[in-house]
Amino acid sequence: MLRPVLHSKIHMARCTAAKPDYIGSITIDADLLERCGMRVNDQVTIANCRNGERFETYIFRGERGSGCIELNGAAAHLVEPGDKLIIMHYAWMSDDEYRGHKPKVLIMRDDNTIDRVMHYESEREW
């Protein structure tokens, strides 16, 4: 059996732009994608810490080193520049894959640089 499991997370990134007239997605700095293991076109769930909105979209690659976290299309109406966001990526895993998996979490500074990287432990006693 496969279950959706947290693969990686970008925690408390600051929204740098909201572009409702742009093709839908979230644009994320290429450096951040590489550091956490997210990929272009991966589905992500986004939580807006200011207003509690939670929504899904897919990833576009942003300019390397730009710090961009831009919401595009319809999702742009759910955020404002400056909002703190939690970006979560899930993967379908078997029980065996889950046992060895440690989701990677980027803890962000206000300028969208990485403060630290951590890993969540998977529950092993079930």
Image: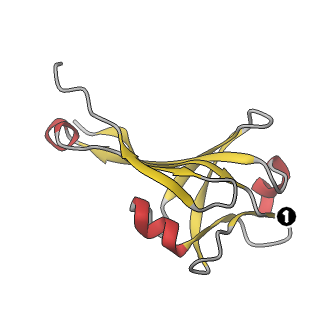
The answer to which of 83 and 89 lies nearer the viewer is 83
Residue 92 location in percent, x, y? 32, 46
Query: What residue is pinned by disc 1?
Result: 20
Asked whether, in this view, residue 90 is left or right of residue 122, the answer is right
The answer to which of 23 and 46 lies nearer the viewer is 46
Residue 6 location in percent, x, y? 40, 42
Tell me which residue sits at (65%, 76%) in the image.
66
Residue 11 location in percent, x, y? 56, 46
How packed mark 1 is, by other alpha carbons closer than 10 Å (few <14, some 14-19, many 20 or more), is some
Compared to residue 50, the image places residue 14 above or below, namely below
Kind of residue indicated by mark 1: Pro
The answer to which of 33 and 26 lies nearer the viewer is 33
Asked whether, in this view, residue 34 is left or right of residue 60, the answer is left
Tell me which residue sits at (42%, 69%) in the image.
34
Total number of numbered discs in the rendering: 1
Q: How is the image coloured?
A: secondary structure
Compared to residue 35, the image places residue 104 above or below, namely above
Tell me which residue sits at (72%, 37%) in the image.
49
